[in-house]
Structure formats: structure tokens, C-alpha cells
Image: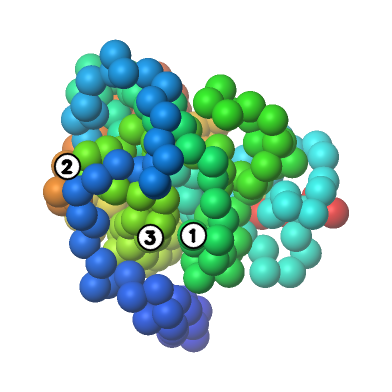
Amino acid sequence: MASRRSLLLLLQVLFATVLSVSAYLPETGRLAGDDVVEVNRSQREFDYFALSLQWPGTYCRGTRHCCSKNACCRSSDTPTQFTIHGLWPDYNDGSWPSCCYRSDFNEKEISTLVDGMEKYWPSLSCGSPSSCHGGKGSFWGHEKHGTCSSPVIRDEYSYFITTLNLYFKHNVTDVLYQAGYVASNSEKYPLGGIVTAIQNAFHITPEVVCKRDAIDEIRICFYKDFKPRDCVGSKDMTSKKSCPKYVSLPEYTPLG
């Protein structure tokens, strides 16, 4: 256990040093870059951010196709921790904006981040559908929710580095590991215990999304100044809207 924690800490420190993540605070502006075209001007400014983290062991069980960009097919450098799905601007009424501005995704803008993103923000499928841009391309280029993060986040690079910063600072995988909740194809864990572990670590209530009895996503929410807050959807957990009383964290099994 000690060696696992030391390795995880070393990876985080090295990655954070390269990216200068800990020193970053986003400035005001829009996400789209220099040549922005508005797609939907009618959407009001969002209320808060939701950092959506997906559990590969659950998601990859439903994946049937392999390709070079699908992390579910990796036999090495496998995604065995929660990975980033996105940082999503949301409304307090439970709805969310999307496709607010349009610009071409430029991977050169985030070239210094790509190696880390391949590990912590990988694509878990072969397709990259998007109602904003259409067509095919980089998984990260289809982050349609991120286009609505203005005026808090100003550009493409800021969006991705801010998301990575929040991911490392709020390490859900490590929090659950320390509480005894680890990947297993046989164990079932109390949903309340998992939520309590996160509450104790970050002093907020997350939103948990399940596929049947398996945790699919955990969402950590933030005010627009990036201080943690309760997620709107966290109020539904006691009603078993998504998750049963006991849940699982399936082990990752590569498809390829």
C-alpha cells in the first residue's frame, strides 16, 4: 500500500511540476480563442462547474470496439483510476448549457499537456460524437460543454489546465483507496460509505452515477471561483434515482 501511494504521489508531483498546475489560476475570458463564432446567444451564464470523473472498469464493460485511441483497449499504461470525462458548466436547476461558442480545436495549444491527458483524460471509445461541430476528430476537441465556461475560463489551454488542476487537487481515487474502496469484481460497497469518504475529504456532497450496481461516474462540483460545493444532483442519491444501496467498482479489463 505504501509503495502504491508513493508512486501515485510521485506521478502527481512530476506531472504538476511540468504543467505548473499548482500555480495556475484562470483569468477572465472566453474559451474559444481568437476567432470565436457564437452558436447560441440565448443561453444564460452558468451557475457552477461539475468535474465529471468516470470509472473505466464500468465504462469499458460496455465498449465493444477497439481502435488506437480507445483507452479501453490498452494492455499497458491502463486506466485503473478515475479518469476525467469533462469540466461542465451547469445550472442550479439541474440543466446545463452546451455549444455556446464555436472555434476549431487546436491540439497544438495543449501540446505540453497531451502526454498527461492521454493517461488522465483518455477517450474510452472509438467515436467522438458532438452536436456542436459534427464529424470526427480528437476526443478533447468535442468538449462541447467547455465552450460555455466563459467568462470564468478564457481559452482552450486554460480550460484543460484548470480541469487537470482540479483533478489532481481532488483525487477521488486516492480518497476511496484510503477508505478501503478499491477495484473488485466481487466486492459490493455501501454507497453511503463512499459518499461519506468524499464528504470527509472535500467537505461537500458529490453526485454519483451508476450503471445498474456499478459506479460509472462521480462528480465533484465547484463554485465559479473553484471552491468546492455540493452538487445539485447529490440531493437525489437517497432516492436511489441512479445507484442502489450497495455498489461496485469493477476491475478494468482491457478489450484488446
Q: Is residue 255 left or right of residue 160?
A: right
Residue 175 horizontal/vertical position (percent): 34, 61
- Measured Cα–Cα span from mark 1 to mark 2: 26 Å
Is 163 or 245 nearer to us in this picture? 163
**Which residue is located at x 82 percent, y 46 percent?**
66
Q: Are marks 2 and 3 in contact (CB under 8 Å)?
A: no
- Measured Cα–Cα span from mark 1 to mark 3: 11 Å
Viewer-nearest of discs 1 and 3: 1
Is 159 or 170 nearer to us in this picture? 159
**Which residue is located at x 46 percent, y 32 percent?**
102
Dot 3 falls on a residue whose secondary structure is helix
Which residue is under mark 3? 161
Which label number is shown at residue 109? 1
Q: Is residue 49 visible?
A: no
Which residue is under mark 2? 223
Q: Are marks 1 and 2 in contact (CB under 8 Å)?
A: no
Viewer-nearest of discs 2 and 3: 3
Label 3 sits on what residue type?
Ile
- Measured Cα–Cα span from mark 2 to mark 3: 17 Å
Sequence-first disc among 1 and 2: 1
Residue 12 horizontal/vertical position (percent): 42, 75
Position of the C terminus by quadrant: bottom right
Which residue is farthest top? 42
Sequence-first disc among 2 and 3: 3
**Which residue is located at x 54 percent, y 66 percent?**
111
Classify residue 105 by image quadrant: top right
Dot 2 falls on a residue whose secondary structure is loop
Q: Is residue 154 left or right of residue 39?
A: left
